[in-house]
Image (spheres, rainbow, N blue to C red):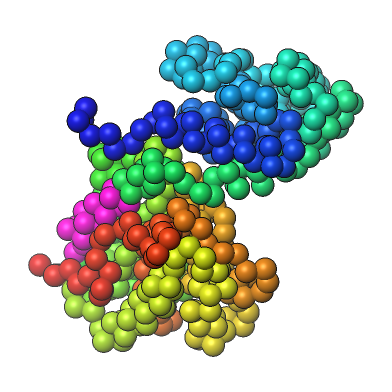
Amino acid sequence: MDWEERINMDRMRRYRMGRVKQQMERMKLGAILSINEWNMRYMTSTWNAYWTTPASGLRYSMFPVTKDSPILYEQGEIGYHARQMAPWLHKVKVAMTGAGWIGRVMGPAGHEQQLKKFCQQIVDDLKQAGVEKETLAMDVWDPGIVAEFQRLGIKVSADGAAAMLEARRIKNRDEIECLRTAATISDAMFGAVARAIRPGVKESELCGIAHKTAYDLGARIYSGVFVTSGPFAWPNPRDESDRIIRPGDILYMDTYNTAYMGYKTCVYRTYSCGKASQEAKDDYKLALDWLYDAINIIRAGVTTREIAEKWPSGPEVWKDIHVISEDQTAGSNWAHGIGLTLYEPPIIWRAVSLNPPDIPLEENMTFAIETQHGRPGKHGVRIEEMVRVTKSGVEVMTKFPVDEILEVPLV
């Protein structure tokens, strides 16, 4: 609508490019060369068909610290459209296809030929930007590319990924609004699935309903979303099948990798097909307490250790599924930064966060935070919220109810 700003795309683009420049200046880099599709999206605000990912080398970008915007090297003739649609970019050039995994399927001679073209193209643009004597940071480390750059006299480092993750760590108001919108779509997906749960429906059917809801509301899903149910929901398999839902089943759904403008969700909700057992309700209450004991202390300045301390020892509470080490609890009771990718800094997890150094949270960090519990052969429950860190507390961006298992009537 022309009378509501909502997301200011130009402001978001300028903020993201500014964050990348800040990191290059802080780390004393001459340029960042990005082959990772999400780093490319962050710095260029462009996207291409999903077959050009992940880190394929079919397209790439470079941001010289001396320029105000990056160079996009676009795949084939697609650059024709990018030149029309992305006027904020410094240059749009044809990609020399040969970096990344695509080069490896060309055969040795073709790979060597294209790799040399790729590196020479980058070197020429480094010289044009006046940074050929400075460090070129790569976000995807390829020994063949590194060797060719070194042969051409370019100093390279593997710091590109770290620089980009640091840039992406703090969101501006428009990125946060993208995440809120993604969370809103997640809420709708949960509602649509709740209306479809009944004896005889399959897990895969419920996933299809969730996908349709997301696409109807303007989202895209990047290899995500699952529903799991009944005895297969504990331990969490993190995938769905064609299992048929039965009366009394507990089931949960994760909307992970549902995205709005590239910004991802990761949200769980738990349902019951008919009445839930008291055991399931008790387990859910425990998981909910673990979740909100952590959420309720989040604010700028609180450390990752303080949050991880709110969760119980995995080996103590999950002996029945043979957990003997926190290394087995990766992805269980934990929190992860979220933005253009599902996992962004920092990860909060007892295996790493109870050890120094403590990482303080900062205003406008965004997280997904999740907990789970269950009983083997019976049921599993899982809950997850998306949150934004504020100076004085936390904004919970997800709104679909979590107070109790959502009991869906059988008829």
The N terminus: image quadrant: top left
Q: Is residue 333 left or right of residue 158?
A: left
Query: How many numbered markers are drawn?
Result: 0
Q: Main secondary structure of the magenta part?
A: helix
What is the x, y in percent for residue 26?
Answer: 69, 42
Across and down, in percent, residue 202 comes to: 29, 59
Q: Residue 223's x, y, as percent? A: 45, 46
* Residue 229 sits in quarter: bottom left
Q: Quadrant of residue 196?
A: bottom left
What residue sits 44% from the left and 68% below the top? 298
Residue appearing at x 25%, y 83% in the figure: 277
Residue 336 percent coordinates (x, y): 51, 60
Residue 111 inside the magenta-drawn segment: no
Of residues 329 and 123, the one nearer the viewer is 123
Q: Is residue 197 magenta?
A: yes
Whether residue 105 is visible: no
Above or below, 131 relative to 370: above
Bounds of the magenta span?
183-198
Left or right: residue 359 versus residue 197 is: right
- At a point 52% along the width and 62% down the height, the residue shown is 361
Name the residue: 57% across, 59% down: 346
Q: Nearer the viewer, residue 329 or 92?
A: 92
**In the figure, is residue 377 to the left or right of 245?**
right
Q: Is residue 283 left or right of residue 365?
A: left
Image quarter (top left, top right, bottom left or bottom right) of the C terminus = bottom left
- Is residue 406 shown to the viewer in this render? yes
- Residue reaching furthest front? 391
